[in-house]
């Protein structure tokens, strides 16, 4: 008799050097249900999936029961034989082979046949695609398909062997609304066949619509199992991060705050035109607008890297004509670039060298040599202050998560103690908790008297975190407004920004 | 200065994962043992070791010069031409100014002047490379290939293709003398290795150089003068060539426009073998030294065994390819480990 639960994991522990990745997690998936596993990066969800698919071994006191059978020594082969298949976000298809070849590849290998039976291959592939009710040309090369179609091919491939549990890692991340719907039709067909589905995700998204249960992990602990109906965005963020999204507006500016920067009719051909605005001490000025609106070019001009053709930049009551960013930096400007990977950080180099690059000369002793002890002290201080999660100081900065990488960029500029900090898309591609802490940090800095220019395409971001907002389009400032004057929707509508 | 407690657990983990670092020492020991046994330990004789110690410094300094340029993502193909030009000038000064009957005080003065002028010229040639690469932004291969020919042309137009020999005895001591049995060239080499090591690991400029090799744009965004740093790098590379030149012309008592041309690719080979990333951003001085010793031992051993130089060349090639493949896997493994480690923090 088939059991009610396809997967029962009990007291799963997993230790990595110095880290408890999973701490006594119990995890149950029922037969034929769609289940969601959510958590931030580092919550242990990937480790759990790796254990389930036999890639990683749990600690000895853990118990895994698959389809009513205790599996003490799970490896990836046994896991597959038990009917567990994982589809990762970066699909594992052969792009230069056809759909049929990709689908039937596994079953062909299974039989240890040395030769390819083309007819049989088509038959297997056709059958698998029919099973999920999808029509894709068998002889098309996989690289010619859309991501959504490739995903379906991979699901079909999983069906060529006995399938009991299909694990999908962030399945809707790069799909359009329509493609998501067709994926969901496939999912419900699979459920009808008694196949269980496990979605793995780090945020609230469409998959909640079709899931029966949601398991939330945080820091290797199971927070609970919920029905999707019980959860909304704010609640989920709270469960995953143990913090609420920072929706505090910055403290209002004092009326007599000094103007620190005054930009007058700044123009640069093919970049921006006739830009005028002022920035006060302790003010957070938001600049929003679509990509290509000239906002980054403007920021670079204020940072001395893109000299304007005409117009004035008046910084601390004096007109400045910076010829390089070195001059701008020594005057007191910091710039966190939009492109973290290419401009913000040197991805292959150690964390310690990245975080101290802007201030390296200040760690030099009388003999002209660097004091590594002092550099480490600085790193540890910033690590505490910005809550940076990292391993060794010598590790390449690319080994960090996006949020922690961005904190390194912020740290290297904060150490310069700028009077104006320009942030270009400061929270692009990073998780909620890091985003939150960056928003909080920005407001603290402004409160301490630093002026901030925050460029973002996310209207909500500038609305909650800025004192004043400029909207740019085609190199010009369209208008200026206060966050409470307009709602996001009104803005989008009025200026056609979406 | 505050002492930092050694974290043995951390040390073990890093070393354990650093498969790359243990390769060269093991290789060196294996080749050394093999050669020793194959030559029934004649290979380890004092004479042989001493002769190797005289041969290593020149190639070693050229490899350092190459490594410095590679560290910033460049290359310096003009190292030998630079050395030869500076050597020709030094030899010219010394042979013209010092006569058989000159006093030792005067000779010493001229030798010092010649060396200073030679080193300054080497640095100026480096500066020119730096301007081409850093400021005019010509690709390093193209720039230094051109200056390689240009500098050789300078030397040839002075020497007309002939060697300049008959250098003062005092000067010849640099390349042939020893202190406490240690060859002087080797001591000079060791001093400059330490200096380079300090520059790379303990000075801001060294850090900038390595980081420019990884991503010059991000370094520029951080407010560092990338052009100037590149200029400085090629000047330092030129200086290393100049010092190699001092040793070279004094060892063979002659300067020539076309000495040691085979050293160019050999120094590239040693720098890469030693762990320098040819695309820049990663350098290990210790690794380059190990690679240098390994190749020298392999070479001397092959000579001692009477194996043909053609076979030797093949063996070097095989070694290089294998090491590069090995390194590829080792680096991937290490990055994977570090990424997981960070994720699980």
Image (spheres, rainbow, N blue to C red):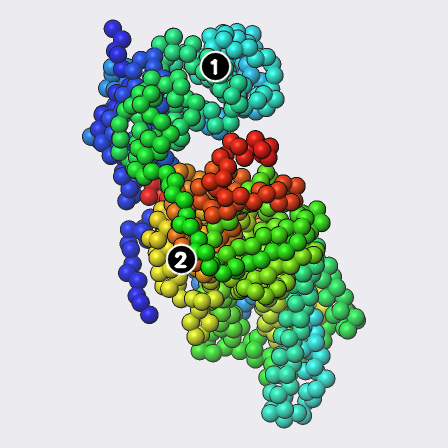
Residue at 43 percent across and 56 percent down: it is A254
Label 2 CA crowd tier, 10 Å (few <14, some 14–19, many 20+): few
Residue B18 place in picture, x, y as percent: 40, 49
Does residue A89 appear to the left or right of B245 in the view shown?
left
Residue B132 place in picture, x, y as percent: 69, 61
Residue B57, numbered label: none
List the residue tagged with mark 2: A448
Task: Give the quarter of the figure containing the N terminus of chain A.
Answer: top left
Residue A439 place in picture, x, y as percent: 42, 45
Q: Is residue B63 visible?
A: no
- Image quarter of residue B141: bottom right
- Give the letter of the chain under mark 1: A
Residue A156, numbered label: 1
Instruction: Name the one closer to the observer, A224 or B327.
Output: A224
- Marks 2,1: beta carbons within 8 A: no
Task: Give the quarter of the figure containing the C terminus of chain A.
Answer: top right
- Image quarter of residue A53: top left
């Amino acid at each position: 008799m088939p059991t009610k639960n396809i997967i029962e994991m009990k007291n799963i522990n997993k230790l990595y050097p110095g880290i408890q990745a999973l701490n006594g997690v119990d995890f149950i998936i029922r037969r034929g249900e769609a289940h969601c596993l959510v958590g931030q990066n580092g919550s242990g969800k990937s480790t759990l999936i790796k254990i389930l698919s036999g890639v990683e071994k749990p600690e000895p006191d853990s118990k895994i029961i698959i389809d009513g059978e205790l599996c003490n020594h799970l490896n990836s082969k046994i896991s597959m034989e038990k009917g567990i298949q994982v589809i990762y976000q970066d699909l594992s298809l052969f792009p230069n082979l056809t759909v049929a070849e990709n689908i039937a590849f596994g079953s062909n290998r299974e039989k240890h046949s040395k030769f390819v039976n083309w007819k049989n291959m088509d038959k297997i592939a056709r059958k698998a695609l029919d099973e999920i009710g999808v029509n894709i040309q068998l002889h098309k090369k996989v690289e010619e398909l859309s991501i959504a179609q490739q995903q379906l091919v991979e699901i079909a491939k999983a069906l060529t062997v006995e399938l009991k549990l299909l694990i999908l890692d962030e399945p809707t991340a790069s799909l359009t609304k329509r493609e998501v719907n067709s994926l969901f039709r496939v999912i419900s067909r699979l459920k009808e066949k008694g196949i269980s589905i496990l979605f793995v995700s780090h945020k609230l998204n469409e998959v909640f619509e079709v899931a029966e249960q949601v398991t939330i992990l945080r820091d290797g602990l199971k927070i609970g199992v919920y029905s999707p109906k019980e959860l909304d965005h704010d609640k989920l963020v709270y469960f995953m991060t143990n913090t609420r999204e920072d929706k505090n507006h910055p403290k209002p500016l004092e009326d007599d705050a000094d103007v620190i920067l005054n930009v007058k009719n700044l123009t640069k051909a093919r970049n921006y035109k006739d830009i005028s605005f002022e920035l006060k001490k302790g003010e957070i000025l938001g600049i929003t607008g679509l990509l290509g609106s000239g906002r980054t070019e403007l920021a670079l001009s204020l940072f001395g890297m893109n000299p304007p053709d005409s117009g004035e930049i008046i910084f601390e009551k004096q007109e400045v004509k910076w010829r390089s960013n070195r001059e701008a930096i020594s005057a007191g400007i910091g710039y966190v670039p939009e492109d973290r990977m290419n401009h913000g950080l040197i991805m292959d180099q150690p964390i310690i060298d990245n975080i101290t690059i802007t201030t390296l000369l200040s760690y030099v002793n009388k003999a002209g040599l660097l004091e590594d002890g002092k550099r480490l002290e600085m790193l540890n201080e910033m690590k505490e202050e910005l809550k940076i999660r990292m391993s060794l100081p010598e590790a390449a900065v690319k080994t960090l998560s996006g949020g922690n990488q961005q904190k390194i960029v912020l740290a290297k500029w904060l150490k310069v103690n700028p009077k104006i900090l320009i942030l270009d898309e400061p929270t692009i591609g990073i998780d909620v908790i890091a985003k939150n802490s960056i928003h909080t940090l920005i407001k603290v800095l402004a409160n301490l008297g630093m002026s901030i220019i925050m460029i973002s395409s996310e209207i909500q971001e500038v609305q909650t975190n800025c004192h004043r907002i400029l909207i740019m389009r085609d190199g010009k400032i369209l208008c200026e407004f206060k966050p409470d004057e307009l709602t996001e929707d009104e803005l989008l509508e009025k200026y056609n920004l979406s | 200065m505050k002492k930092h407690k050694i974290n043995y657990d951390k040390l073990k983990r890093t070393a354990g994962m650093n498969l790359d670092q243990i390769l060269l020492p093991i290789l060196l020991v294996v080749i050394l043992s093999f050669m020793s046994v194959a030559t029934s330990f004649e290979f380890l004789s004092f004479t042989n070791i001493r002769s190797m110690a005289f041969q290593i410094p020149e190639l070693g300094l050229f490899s350092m010069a190459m490594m410095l340029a590679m560290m910033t993502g460049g290359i310096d193909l003009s190292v030998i031409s630079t050395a030869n030009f500076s050597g020709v000038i030094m030899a010219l000064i010394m042979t013209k100014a010092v006569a058989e009957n000159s006093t030792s005080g005067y000779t010493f003065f001229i030798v010092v002047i010649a060396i200073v002028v030679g080193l300054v010229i080497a640095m100026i040639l480096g500066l020119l490379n730096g301007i081409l690469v850093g400021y005019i932004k010509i690709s390093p291969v193209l720039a230094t290939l051109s200056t390689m020919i240009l500098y050789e042309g300078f030397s040839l137009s002075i020497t007309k293709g002939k060697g300049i020999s008959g250098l003062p005895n005092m000067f010849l001591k640099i390349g042939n003398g020893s202190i406490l049995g240690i060859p002087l060239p080797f001591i000079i080499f060791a001093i400059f290795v330490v200096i380079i090591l300090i520059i790379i690991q303990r000075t801001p400029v060294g850090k900038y150089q390595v980081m420019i090799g990884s991503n010059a744009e991000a370094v520029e965004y951080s407010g560092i003068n990338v052009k100037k740093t590149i200029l400085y790098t090629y000047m330092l590379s030129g200086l290393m060539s100049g010092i190699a030149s001092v040793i070279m012309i004094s060892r063979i008592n002659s300067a020539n426009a076309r000495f040691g041309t085979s050293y160019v690719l050999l120094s590239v080979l040693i720098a890469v073998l030693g762990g320098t990333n040819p695309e820049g951003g990663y350098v290990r001085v210790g690794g380059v030294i190990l690679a240098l010793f390994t190749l020298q031992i392999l070479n001397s051993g092959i000579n001692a065994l009477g194996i043909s130089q053609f076979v030797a060349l093949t063996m070097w090639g095989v070694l290089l390819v294998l090491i590069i493949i090995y390194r590829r896997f080792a680096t991937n493994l290490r990055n994977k480990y570090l990424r997981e480690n960070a994720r699980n923090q």
